[in-house]
Image (spheres, grey):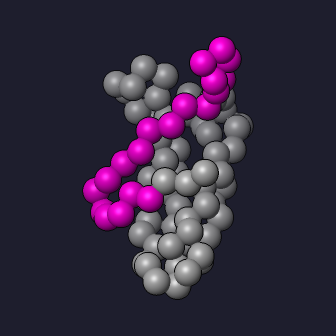
Amino acid sequence: RFVSLGATGHWVSVSFGTRNEDVTVRNGDVIIVYELGTTLCGMFDDEPYLVSVSSDLDTWIEMGEGGRGTNNIVVSGL
């Protein structure tokens, strides 16, 4: 599945788990982000983005940034 944010300044929040299973993101884990804009159809510009994590949805820790194509964001600083 994928999410289209459409424009600069938008955000999305995701959870890694299910209703019955809590998955904790830890140092050393890798979050993979696929930027589909230009890569997929050549019609849209790929905007840079930031990836942050939070355990309480109040305090956020920036993990890294990405852009065009596939980006591996290594979790650290938790």
Please tell me how many numbered marks the rendered image carries: 0
* Left or right of residue 17, residue 2 in this image: left
Instruction: Give the residue at x 55% y 65%.
Output: 35
Q: Is 7 included in the stretch rendered in magenta?
A: yes
Instruction: Give the residue at x 30% y 63%.
Output: 8
Location of residue 18 (image quadrant): top right
* Left or right of residue 47, residue 28 in this image: right
Where does residue 78 sit, x and y in percent of width and height?
Answer: 56, 28
Where does residue 50 sit, x and y in percent of width and height?
Answer: 44, 53
Above or below residue 1? Residue 46 is below
Where does residue 76 sit, x and y in percent of width and height?
Answer: 60, 37
Q: Main secondary structure of the magenta part?
A: loop
Q: Is 41 included in the stretch rendered in magenta?
A: no
Instruction: Give the residue at x 41% y 45%.
Output: 12
Quick check: can you spot residue 45?
Answer: yes
Where does residue 65 sit, x and y in percent of width and height?
Answer: 50, 57
Q: Nearer the viewer, residue 45 or 52?
A: 45
Residue lying furthest left: 9
Quick check: can you spot residue 24?
Answer: no
